[in-house]
Amino acid sequence: MEVGRLTGAFDLLTVGQLDVIAQARRRCERLVARVRTDEQVERLEGLAPVMPLDERISLVAALKDVDDVDVVGPAEAAAGLGPKQAYLFTAEAPGATAEVLRPRSDAPALPAVAEVIVRTEASDPGVRVGYVPGGWDMFHIGHLRIIERARSLCDRLVVGVVTDEALVRAKGRPPMVTLAERAAVVDAISLVDDVVVDTSSNKLLAWEKVGFDVLFKGDDWRGTAKGDRLEAEMAQVGVELRYFPYTPHTSSTALRSVLAAR
Protein backbone atom coordinates (compact mmCIF):
# COMPACT_ATOMS: atom_id res chain seq x y z
CA MET A 1 0.00 0.00 0.00
CA GLU A 2 1.49 3.33 -1.07
CA VAL A 3 1.56 5.83 1.78
CA GLY A 4 1.57 9.57 1.12
CA ARG A 5 2.50 12.28 3.59
CA LEU A 6 1.06 15.79 3.38
CA THR A 7 2.87 18.40 5.48
CA GLY A 8 1.36 21.76 6.37
CA ALA A 9 -0.20 24.00 9.00
CA PHE A 10 -3.77 22.68 8.56
CA ASP A 11 -5.06 25.87 10.16
CA LEU A 12 -8.83 26.37 9.75
CA LEU A 13 -10.87 23.93 7.70
CA THR A 14 -11.59 25.56 4.36
CA VAL A 15 -12.60 24.26 0.95
CA GLY A 16 -9.11 25.23 -0.25
CA GLN A 17 -7.53 23.00 2.36
CA LEU A 18 -9.97 20.21 1.53
CA ASP A 19 -9.00 20.54 -2.13
CA VAL A 20 -5.30 20.11 -1.27
CA ILE A 21 -6.08 17.05 0.85
CA ALA A 22 -8.16 15.58 -1.98
CA GLN A 23 -5.26 16.14 -4.41
CA ALA A 24 -2.93 14.30 -2.04
CA ARG A 25 -5.40 11.48 -1.44
CA ARG A 26 -5.62 10.76 -5.18
CA ARG A 27 -1.84 10.30 -5.25
CA CYS A 28 -1.72 7.53 -2.64
CA GLU A 29 -3.68 4.71 -1.04
CA ARG A 30 -3.14 5.88 2.54
CA LEU A 31 -2.71 9.54 3.54
CA VAL A 32 -0.87 10.79 6.61
CA ALA A 33 -1.30 14.47 7.50
CA ARG A 34 1.86 15.90 9.07
CA VAL A 35 0.96 18.96 11.14
CA ARG A 36 3.45 21.74 11.85
CA THR A 37 3.79 23.01 15.42
CA ASP A 38 2.67 26.51 16.37
CA GLU A 39 6.30 27.67 16.45
CA GLN A 40 7.06 26.20 13.02
CA VAL A 41 4.02 27.86 11.45
CA GLU A 42 4.89 31.24 12.92
CA ARG A 43 8.50 30.98 11.75
CA LEU A 44 7.57 29.92 8.20
CA GLU A 45 4.52 32.11 7.61
CA GLY A 46 5.21 35.10 9.85
CA LEU A 47 1.98 34.65 11.84
CA ALA A 48 0.97 32.26 14.58
CA PRO A 49 -1.79 29.83 13.55
CA VAL A 50 -5.36 30.78 14.39
CA MET A 51 -5.88 27.42 16.09
CA PRO A 52 -3.42 25.74 18.49
CA LEU A 53 -1.66 22.52 17.57
CA ASP A 54 -3.89 20.12 19.51
CA GLU A 55 -7.04 21.51 17.89
CA ARG A 56 -5.51 21.42 14.40
CA ILE A 57 -4.54 17.78 14.93
CA SER A 58 -8.06 16.85 16.09
CA LEU A 59 -9.75 18.60 13.17
CA VAL A 60 -7.59 17.15 10.41
CA ALA A 61 -7.76 13.68 12.00
CA ALA A 62 -11.58 13.85 11.74
CA LEU A 63 -11.55 14.19 7.94
CA LYS A 64 -12.73 11.35 5.71
CA ASP A 65 -9.70 11.59 3.40
CA VAL A 66 -7.08 11.46 6.19
CA ASP A 67 -5.96 8.06 7.50
CA ASP A 68 -3.46 9.13 10.15
CA VAL A 69 -1.86 12.24 11.67
CA ASP A 70 1.54 13.04 13.14
CA VAL A 71 3.51 16.16 14.06
CA VAL A 72 6.49 17.52 12.13
CA GLY A 73 9.66 17.06 14.15
CA PRO A 74 12.30 19.77 14.76
CA ALA A 75 14.80 18.17 12.40
CA GLU A 76 12.35 18.29 9.50
CA ALA A 77 10.93 21.73 10.18
CA ALA A 78 13.71 23.51 8.30
CA ALA A 79 12.55 21.92 5.04
CA GLY A 80 9.39 23.98 5.18
CA LEU A 81 7.56 26.25 2.79
CA GLY A 82 7.15 29.97 3.20
CA PRO A 83 4.01 30.76 1.15
CA LYS A 84 0.74 30.39 3.00
CA GLN A 85 -1.63 27.62 1.93
CA ALA A 86 1.30 25.61 0.56
CA TYR A 87 1.62 21.94 1.45
CA LEU A 88 4.42 19.46 0.80
CA PHE A 89 3.41 16.02 -0.45
CA THR A 90 5.81 13.07 -0.42
CA ALA A 91 5.06 9.48 -1.35
CA GLU A 92 6.79 6.46 0.15
CA ALA A 93 7.71 5.01 -3.22
CA PRO A 94 11.05 4.39 -4.97
CA GLY A 95 12.20 7.47 -6.82
CA ALA A 96 9.34 9.63 -5.53
CA THR A 97 10.08 13.34 -5.21
CA ALA A 98 8.46 15.96 -2.99
CA GLU A 99 5.67 17.95 -4.57
CA VAL A 100 4.24 21.31 -3.56
CA LEU A 101 0.43 21.35 -3.48
CA ARG A 102 -1.81 24.41 -3.27
CA PRO A 103 -5.55 24.98 -3.63
CA ARG A 104 -6.37 24.92 -7.34
CA SER A 105 -7.80 27.97 -9.03
CA ASP A 106 -9.64 25.61 -11.41
CA ALA A 107 -11.03 23.33 -8.71
CA PRO A 108 -14.54 22.00 -9.41
CA ALA A 109 -17.22 24.47 -8.44
CA LEU A 110 -19.08 23.82 -5.23
CA PRO A 111 -22.64 22.57 -5.73
CA ALA A 112 -25.45 25.07 -5.81
CA VAL A 113 -27.52 25.32 -2.65
CA ALA A 114 -30.33 23.18 -4.07
CA GLU A 115 -27.81 20.47 -4.93
CA VAL A 116 -26.30 20.47 -1.45
CA ILE A 117 -29.52 19.06 -0.04
CA VAL A 118 -29.32 15.31 0.51
CA ARG A 119 -32.47 13.43 1.40
CA THR A 120 -31.83 10.48 3.69
CA GLU A 121 -33.29 7.11 2.90
CA ALA A 122 -35.87 5.53 5.18
CA SER A 123 -34.12 4.09 8.21
CA ASP A 124 -33.86 0.37 8.76
CA PRO A 125 -35.71 -0.88 11.83
CA GLY A 126 -33.61 -0.31 14.91
CA VAL A 127 -31.41 2.38 13.31
CA ARG A 128 -31.44 5.53 15.45
CA VAL A 129 -31.09 8.65 13.29
CA GLY A 130 -29.81 11.82 14.94
CA TYR A 131 -30.09 15.36 13.63
CA VAL A 132 -27.95 18.29 14.73
CA PRO A 133 -28.49 21.69 13.07
CA GLY A 134 -26.02 24.56 13.25
CA GLY A 135 -24.25 27.38 11.46
CA TRP A 136 -20.82 25.65 11.46
CA ASP A 137 -19.16 28.94 10.48
CA MET A 138 -15.35 28.68 10.47
CA PHE A 139 -15.48 25.06 11.62
CA HIS A 140 -13.60 24.69 14.92
CA ILE A 141 -12.96 22.22 17.73
CA GLY A 142 -16.21 23.12 19.50
CA HIS A 143 -18.14 22.13 16.38
CA LEU A 144 -16.25 18.85 16.15
CA ARG A 145 -16.98 17.99 19.80
CA ILE A 146 -20.71 18.54 19.20
CA ILE A 147 -20.64 16.21 16.19
CA GLU A 148 -18.63 13.60 18.12
CA ARG A 149 -21.07 13.62 21.01
CA ALA A 150 -24.11 13.51 18.76
CA ARG A 151 -22.69 10.62 16.74
CA SER A 152 -22.05 8.66 19.95
CA LEU A 153 -25.78 8.82 20.74
CA CYS A 154 -27.15 7.63 17.40
CA ASP A 155 -26.47 5.12 14.64
CA ARG A 156 -26.67 7.61 11.78
CA LEU A 157 -25.99 11.33 12.02
CA VAL A 158 -27.50 13.96 9.75
CA VAL A 159 -26.13 17.50 10.09
CA GLY A 160 -28.22 20.51 9.15
CA VAL A 161 -26.37 23.56 7.83
CA VAL A 162 -28.33 26.75 8.47
CA THR A 163 -28.70 29.13 5.52
CA ASP A 164 -26.90 32.47 5.37
CA GLU A 165 -30.23 34.29 5.61
CA ALA A 166 -31.26 32.41 8.75
CA LEU A 167 -27.93 33.21 10.41
CA VAL A 168 -28.38 36.89 9.64
CA ARG A 169 -31.81 36.79 11.27
CA ALA A 170 -30.46 34.95 14.33
CA LYS A 171 -27.13 36.75 14.84
CA GLY A 172 -27.56 40.05 13.05
CA ARG A 173 -24.63 39.48 10.70
CA PRO A 174 -23.80 37.16 7.79
CA PRO A 175 -21.47 34.17 8.28
CA MET A 176 -17.84 34.49 7.19
CA VAL A 177 -18.13 31.27 5.18
CA THR A 178 -20.84 30.75 2.55
CA LEU A 179 -23.51 28.07 2.83
CA ALA A 180 -22.03 25.85 0.12
CA GLU A 181 -18.56 26.02 1.70
CA ARG A 182 -19.89 25.35 5.20
CA ALA A 183 -21.81 22.34 3.89
CA ALA A 184 -18.71 21.03 2.08
CA VAL A 185 -16.59 21.26 5.24
CA VAL A 186 -19.20 19.51 7.39
CA ASP A 187 -19.61 16.80 4.74
CA ALA A 188 -15.85 16.13 4.89
CA ILE A 189 -16.05 15.04 8.56
CA SER A 190 -15.94 11.25 8.84
CA LEU A 191 -18.60 11.04 11.57
CA VAL A 192 -21.20 12.79 9.39
CA ASP A 193 -23.45 10.51 7.34
CA ASP A 194 -25.57 13.12 5.54
CA VAL A 195 -25.76 16.89 5.19
CA VAL A 196 -28.94 18.89 4.59
CA VAL A 197 -29.62 22.59 4.29
CA ASP A 198 -31.64 23.81 7.27
CA THR A 199 -33.95 26.53 5.98
CA SER A 200 -36.26 27.17 8.92
CA SER A 201 -36.39 27.45 12.70
CA ASN A 202 -39.37 25.10 12.49
CA LYS A 203 -37.71 21.72 13.10
CA LEU A 204 -40.87 19.87 12.10
CA LEU A 205 -39.95 20.85 8.53
CA ALA A 206 -36.51 19.32 9.01
CA TRP A 207 -38.10 16.21 10.50
CA GLU A 208 -40.35 15.84 7.45
CA LYS A 209 -37.24 15.95 5.25
CA VAL A 210 -34.92 13.76 7.33
CA GLY A 211 -37.11 11.59 9.57
CA PHE A 212 -34.79 11.70 12.60
CA ASP A 213 -35.36 10.00 15.95
CA VAL A 214 -33.40 12.40 18.16
CA LEU A 215 -32.72 16.12 17.81
CA PHE A 216 -29.63 17.71 19.39
CA LYS A 217 -29.74 21.36 20.50
CA GLY A 218 -27.62 23.68 22.65
CA ASP A 219 -28.56 23.86 26.31
CA ASP A 220 -29.19 27.60 26.02
CA TRP A 221 -32.63 26.50 24.74
CA ARG A 222 -33.43 24.50 27.89
CA GLY A 223 -36.15 26.08 30.04
CA THR A 224 -36.88 28.88 27.55
CA ALA A 225 -40.15 29.53 25.73
CA LYS A 226 -38.63 28.45 22.42
CA GLY A 227 -37.19 25.32 24.04
CA ASP A 228 -40.55 24.40 25.59
CA ARG A 229 -42.23 24.90 22.22
CA LEU A 230 -39.60 22.75 20.48
CA GLU A 231 -40.00 19.98 23.06
CA ALA A 232 -43.78 19.97 22.49
CA GLU A 233 -43.35 19.88 18.70
CA MET A 234 -40.88 17.01 18.82
CA ALA A 235 -43.09 15.07 21.23
CA GLN A 236 -45.88 15.24 18.64
CA VAL A 237 -43.79 13.13 16.23
CA GLY A 238 -42.09 10.93 18.84
CA VAL A 239 -38.66 12.59 18.61
CA GLU A 240 -36.35 12.79 21.63
CA LEU A 241 -34.76 16.20 22.30
CA ARG A 242 -31.24 16.10 23.76
CA TYR A 243 -29.46 19.24 24.99
CA PHE A 244 -25.70 19.72 24.65
CA PRO A 245 -23.55 22.23 26.53
CA TYR A 246 -21.60 24.61 24.36
CA THR A 247 -17.79 24.82 24.46
CA PRO A 248 -17.20 28.43 25.50
CA HIS A 249 -13.42 28.42 25.01
CA THR A 250 -13.72 28.25 21.23
CA SER A 251 -16.36 29.89 19.08
CA SER A 252 -16.79 31.31 15.60
CA THR A 253 -17.14 34.74 17.21
CA ALA A 254 -13.72 34.38 18.85
CA LEU A 255 -12.15 33.24 15.59
CA ARG A 256 -13.76 36.16 13.78
CA SER A 257 -12.07 38.52 16.27
CA VAL A 258 -8.68 36.87 15.75
CA LEU A 259 -8.94 37.10 11.97
CA ALA A 260 -10.14 40.69 12.09
CA ALA A 261 -7.07 41.66 14.09
CA ARG A 262 -4.68 40.38 11.41
Image (cartoon, grey):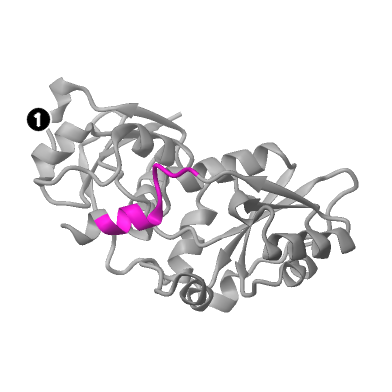
Where is residue 241 shown, x and y percent of the image?
Answer: 75, 51
The residue depicted at 59 percent of the width and 53 percent of the height is 220
Position above or below: 120 against 204: above
165 sits left or right of 148 in the view: left
Circle 1 residue: 78
134 sits left or right of 32 in the view: right
213 sits left or right of 33 in the view: right
Where is residue 234 shown, x and y percent of the image?
Answer: 81, 60
The quarter of the picture where residue 224 lies is bottom right
Q: Considering the numbered disc 1 on the image, is that residue within a helix, a strand or a loop?
A: loop
The front one of 73 and 27 is: 73
The quarter of the picture where residue 9 lies is top left
The residue depicted at 65 percent of the width and 42 percent of the height is 151
The residue depicted at 46 percent of the width and 56 percent of the height is 185
Residue extent of the magenta highlight: 247-257
Where is residue 261 shown, x and y percent of the image?
Answer: 18, 58
The front one of 193 and 261 is: 261
The residue depicted at 75 percent of the width and 69 percent of the height is 209
Position above or below: 109 against 258: below
Where is residue 180 shown, x and y percent of the image?
Answer: 47, 69
User: Is residue 57 covered in magenta?
Assistant: no
Q: Residues within 10 Å of mark 1 (few under 14, many from 20)?
A: few
Note whether residue 64 is visible.
no
Note whether residue 74 is visible.
yes
For badge 1, the amino acid type reads Ala
Q: The C terminus appears in which quarter of the rendering?
A: bottom left
